[in-house]
Image: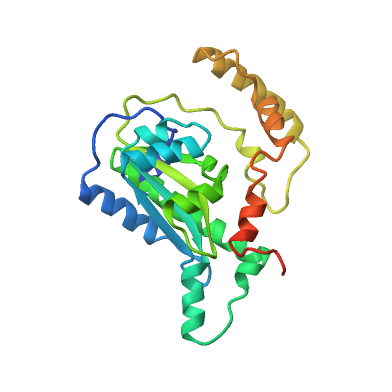
Amino acid sequence: MNSTVQIIKNHRSIRNYLEKDIPEDVLQTILEAAHAMPTSINGQQVSLVVVRDKDTRLNLARLCGGQPWVAKAAVFVLFVADFYKTSLAADLNKVKQVIHESAEGELVGFLDCGISMGGMIIAAESLGLGIVPIGGIRKEAQSVIDLLGLPKYTFPVNGLCIGYPADLSQQKPRLPLATFIHYEKYQRANLVEDIQDYDKQMVSYLKQINRSEEVNWSKHTSSIYQNVYFPNVVTTLKDQGFTHKK
């Protein structure tokens, strides 16, 4: 196994950071790795907002639902689905952009943000940094848009805390590979049994890290997914021009 694959397989989320700045050249390397990731049709409908200002990070931590690591990490990077940039290309060529009005456009922008973040995560971890993705950035998306000055046809998809780890958390077990990898066709036969086995594994893991008061995977996931936990997303998307017309 080469060192890159080992870094990827060793991933864990880090929420406790040292009070240590990231050198400019290291940060630039990480940002360039994200920039190098592929995008649909080479449309490059992704932009990053790099936040180092402490007060801004404190505000973002609050808007994310009270996640202190957003403020504690040396850098917070916001991944933005950016069809404002592509709309300027349309203007230059005297055509009307409509892709942002479609479900396909939203999927493209969001997926490309995820691909870009994946590249940044691998680069950051290869340089000894710790990270944790922040989906809570969508909780109060309009306030994030206002705070960071995002234009029309953009949306804050996800964020990433980056810093030097104060400690290494234990790696969380995953569902069996058989629930993730399906050869030739989707395989449903053993999914329920695999989930039940994983629930038992998670109970053991939580007990091991002294968090036995928490519940297993299926209870945790279903308790969250029985609700739309960020109900304002659909309104903010429409206000930003993502109208779902097509």
Q: Is residue 237 above or below residue 231?
A: below
Q: Can you see residue 63? A: yes
Placement of the N terminus among the 4 image quadrants: top left
Placement of the C terminus among the 4 image quadrants: bottom right
121 left or right of 219 in image: left
The location of residue 42, given as percent across then percent down, is 47, 71
57 left or right of 225 in image: left
Q: Which of these two is toward me, 128 or 227? A: 227
Q: Which of these two is toward me, 13 or 11? A: 13
Q: Is residue 106 above or below residue 9?
A: below
The location of residue 99, given as percent across then percent down, is 61, 71
State the residue at coordinates (66%, 53%): 235
State the residue at coordinates (33%, 54%): 31
State the residue at coordinates (71%, 31%): 222
The location of residue 200, given as percent across then percent down, is 65, 19
Residue that lies at the very extreme toward the right in this rendered image: 189
The location of residue 143, given as percent across then percent down, is 51, 47
